[in-house]
Amino acid sequence: MPTWLFFIGITALTMVICIVVTILWLGKNPSDEDDLDRRLAELAAQNVKKRKERDAASAATK
C-alpha cells in the first residue's frame, strides 16, 4: 500500500471519529443548558423579589 493512501485513510478515520464524538457531545448537552436556563430564571425571580423588598423598605423610611 502506498504511503499517501495510508495517510488519506488515517485522515478520513480521524475525521469520522471527530464527527461522531461531536454529535454525541452535542446530543448530551441540551439538558445541561436547560438546567442553566432554569437556574437563571430562578436567580432573576430572586432579584425581582429582593428589589421589591428594597423598594418597600426605602419607601417606608421616606
Image (cartoon, rainbow, N blue to C red):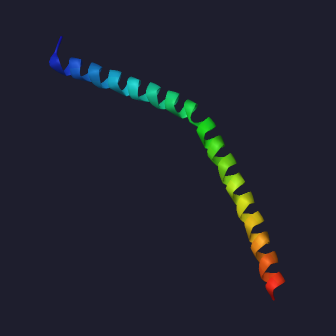
Q: Residue at x 74, y 66 (%)?
A: 50
The quarter holding residue 16 reads top left
The quarter holding residue 62 reads bottom right
Q: Residue at x 69, y 47 (%)?
A: 38
> Which one is nearer the viewer's eye here, 30 or 41?
41
Residue 1, how many percent across, how many down? Answer: 18, 10
User: In screen coordinates, is 24 left or right of 61?
Assistant: left
Residue 3, how many percent across, how many down? Answer: 16, 18
User: In screen coordinates, is 23 left or right of 2?
Assistant: right
Q: Is residue 19 above or below residue 53?
A: above
Q: Residue at x 39, y 24 (%)?
A: 17
Q: Is residue 23 above or below residue 40?
A: above
> Which one is nearer the viewer's eye here, 41 or 19?
41
Residue furthest to the front: 61
User: In screen coordinates, is 56 left or right of 50?
Assistant: right
Residue furthest to the left: 3
Residue furthest to the top: 1
Residue 20, how many percent across, how many down? Answer: 46, 25
